[in-house]
Image: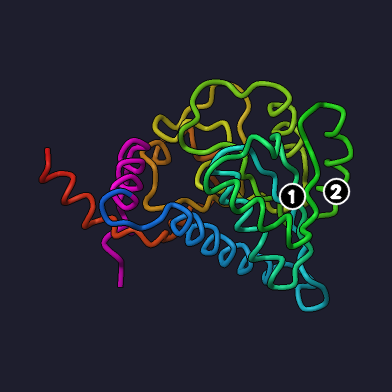
Amino acid sequence: MDKPTDHLCLTCAQCRAVDKYAIEELGIPGVVLMENAGRNAADLIEERLADRPGAQERPGRIAVVCGGGNNGGDGFVVARHLTHRGHEVWIDLMADPARLAGDAAVNHAIVQKMGVPIRPLCDLAAIPTAVHRWRRSDVIVDALLGTGFAGAVREPMAEVIRQINGLSGPLVVAIDVPSGLDADTGQVAGEAVRAHQTVTFLAEKSGYARESARAYTGRITVVDIGAPTMLILSRLAAAQ
């Protein structure tokens, strides 16, 4: 049976309003929402890993490429769960760890204490070594930029995206939105990740239905984050 949210399409502002209401009015901590999002994304990634040739012979190899915001925080949660399940996971971090904040900082600290390899990816010189690792991976998780991003991606992130798009072997899974894609308009101003699979939260974003977005989103799956979306939307509508 379809859930009420299965065919729901929201703007990024509506998604932010749902998150805000869940945290401030219902009292669901943001770190809990991030945990649910990352765990459910990890579940889907593990399902896709099971379909690869030789899946029964060795664990998966997963590169999680993280930015400095909450999208990167979701990536840290994904990395933790897949590591816990026995996969070989490493994180390429395009941010200064000292500048991480809030829920992203909490989850970075956890994966760091677990000993998940975290390698800096903040300048062009680090990219070739990262690409060498990505070529041997089964999955690349794009957790660089979230739905709040608009405009053109700047260097060195633009080069990272070009390198990810140039790989032919790994499955590329975008967390919530392919980095560089405007989730509201479905347009790309510069570089954007061309994902095979997008795991998005709460609902599909309004721009995903546009033909211009299809080359970037790949297959789209909506996963739950533990916020009662329809209840929240009805209360927000009543308050207007």
Q: Residue 204: horizontal and vertical position, in percent?
A: 39, 48
Percent across and percent down for residue 211 are 45, 35
- Residue found 66% across the figure and 62% down from its top: 80
Percent across and percent down for residue 53 are 77, 69
The count of marks equals 2
Q: Is residue 135 visible?
A: yes
Viewport quadrant of the C terminus: top left
> Height in image: 79 above or below 212?
below
The type of colouring in the image is rainbow
Say which of 89 and 61 sits in front.
Answer: 89
Q: Is residue 154 magenta?
A: no
* Residue type, label 2: Arg
Residue 29's image quarter?
bottom left
**Percent position of residue 212, x then y:** 48, 32
Residue annotated with mark 1: 91
Residue drawn where x is 64% and y is 45% of the image: 142
The span picked out in magenta is 1-23
Q: Which residue is mark 2?
A: 133
Q: Decide which of 91, 42 is in the foreground and name it.
A: 91
Of labels 1 and 2, the one closer to you: 1
Q: Secondary structure at mark 1?
A: strand
**Where on the picture, by quarter, is residue 68?**
top right
